[in-house]
Amino acid sequence: MKKLLLSICLLCLSLTAMAQAQTKYGYLSYNALLRAMPEYKEMRLYMDTLRMKYEKEAQYNQQEFEKMFGDYLQGQKDFPKNILEKRQRDLQEAMEKNLAFRHDADSLLKAAEEEMTEPIRKKLNAAIHDVGIERGYECIINTDINVYPFVHQAVSEDATPFVEEKIMPKK
């Protein structure tokens, strides 16, 4: 009976050791892979161009406001009360429109970036998933957020080159 119990314990220990030996993890930097993708680089160029267009329009609006304000300051001594009040309202409206434009531009830029990034992230996620299955990983760890300050090399490997092979165009 003792021999049987000892045999069962040894069998369990050896099965556990075998299971641990087969466990394998991958790790990578998700952000580095994302930034390396040609689609992401194209999206960033487009977003930079769009951002510059919005900034140019915001600067134009600011210059127009400054011109209106300068005209107001020069003529405020000579304006009758009702014209002075009208100019003040015009300045207030122009300032509010400028602020609203900047806020809208920021919202539109953020929405455009999220919309354009979604298919790129899906492609990267699919590549990571495929590599995980192909390489037999239990999971793939994203090292970007520094939650895993240590990853043992005996049970893990850098999955980056395998994912890069899937997301980069063939030369």
Image (tube, rainbow, N blue to C red):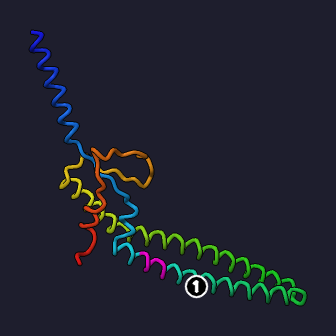
Q: Quadrant of residue 166?
A: bottom left
Out of 54 and 122, give the one closest to the viewer.
122
Out of 82 and 141, give the one closest to the viewer.
141
**Residue 121 shown left or right of residue 12 in the figure:** right
**Residue 99 shown left or right of residue 80 in the figure:** left
Q: Secondary structure at mark 1?
A: helix
Q: Position of residue 141 (x, y in %)?
A: 34, 50
- Does the magenta portion include 54? no
* Residue at screen point 43% across, 71% down: 113
**Residue 91 shown left or right of residue 156 in the figure:** right
* Residue at screen point 31% across, 60% down: 160
* Residue at screen point 35% across, 64% down: 33
Out of 130 and 17, give the one closest to the viewer.
17
Majority secondary structure of the magenta segment?
helix
Out of 85 and 34, give the one closest to the viewer.
34
**Residue 94 shown left or right of residue 49 in the figure:** right
Please give the residue where the numbered disc 1 appears in the rendered image. 56
Q: Position of residue 19 (x, y in %)?
A: 19, 36
- Compared with 104, 83 (above or below) is below
Q: Position of residue 67 (x, y in %)?
A: 74, 88
* Residue at screen point 89% across, 90% down: 78
Residue at the extreme front of the image, as rendered: 154
Please give the range of residues in magenta.
Answer: 44-49
Q: Quadrant of residue 14?
A: top left
